[in-house]
Amino acid sequence: MSQVQSRYRRVLDRVARAERAAGRAAGSVRLIAVSKRHPAGQVRQLAALGQRHFGESYVQEALDKLAQLQDLPLTWHFIGPIQSNKTRAIATHFHWVHSVDRLKIAIRLSEQRPEAAGPLQVLLQVNLSGEPQKAGVAPDQVLPLAQAVNRLPRLHLQGLMTLPRKGDDPMPVFGALARLGEEIGAVLERPLRLSMGMSGDLEQAIAAGAHWVRVGEDIFGPRG
Ligand SMILES: *Cc1c(COP(=O)(O)O)cnc(C)c1O
């Protein structure tokens, strides 16, 4: 087994242990392997072990990689900042987008999603760190954005995502996202899923109710 494959196995074990520790069903948490800044060959090695969900943050890099991996049945999640001029590429090539944080971008993604592809699965990125310049919608603006996105024909609103500030205790942030998910799910009358937790804090995120965890370094190693 290669190094990336054995690291991947260890992360799967961590996810399974965290599910048990939190009293959650086995397999209730989905792992997104964040392959940004790592080559297609490493994605292929994980696909050989059954990993299907991969995350990318940079559009051009992702398009090159996806082209090399077209023969595999993978599901691609876009998790990076979204520029207006990149929405068409994202809407065309990705299955999920975790980083929608304004209506203008959501409208473009909906308009540009190819008819044949089925709805684009989206999550709203929430800024819970209180840094105004950071990506993500402010907590008090999540409900109106969720209601507007919910009405767009080519998008399917799946949940909420957050990215705690490096160095902060992530637990209050994860708890706040979980509460927001409950509140908004109650208004929309359907459950919303949470995308939270990375290499350093996936156990805490799972304890707080994460459905998706997004893990890069602990699988692929440091990014150059
Ligand atoms: C890079 C990235 C990750 C993965 O982070 P690691 O610390 O490498 O596990 C997760 N989420 C987002 C939004 C990212 O940009």
Image (spheres, rainbow, N blue to C red):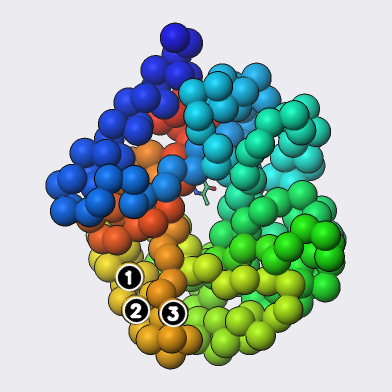
- Residue pictured at 45% horizontal, 19% vertical: 5
Residue 190: which disc?
A: 3
Q: Tag 2: Cα neighbours inside 10 Å, few (<14), some, or many (≥20)?
A: some
> How far separated are the C-alphas under marks 1 and 2?
6 Å
> Horizontal and vertical percent for residue 208?
26, 60
Q: Does the beta carbon of the residue at mark 3 sit less than 8 Å from ligand 1?
A: no
Asked if the residue at tag 2 contacts the one at tag 1, i.e. Cβ–Cβ closer than 8 Å, the answer is yes
Q: Tag 1: Cα neighbours inside 10 Å, few (<14), some, or many (≥20)?
A: many
- Judged from the image, the secondary structure of the residue bearing numbered disc 2 is helix
- Residue pictured at 55% horizontal, 37% vertical: 52
Q: Is residue 69 visible?
A: yes
> Horizontal and vertical percent for residue 32?
49, 43
Q: Quadrant of the N terminus?
A: top left
Q: Is residue 209 left or right of residue 82?
A: left
Q: Which of the 4 image quadrants contains residue 110?
A: bottom right
> Horizontal and vertical percent for residue 129?
40, 67
Quickly name the residue at label 1. 178
- The amino acid pointed to by label 2 is Glu
- Residue pictured at 47% horizontal, 68% vertical: 160
Residue 182: which disc?
A: 2
- Position above or below: 161 against 198: below
Q: Is residue 203 left or right of residue 55?
A: left
136 and 10: which one is in front? Answer: 10
- The amino acid pointed to by label 1 is Ala
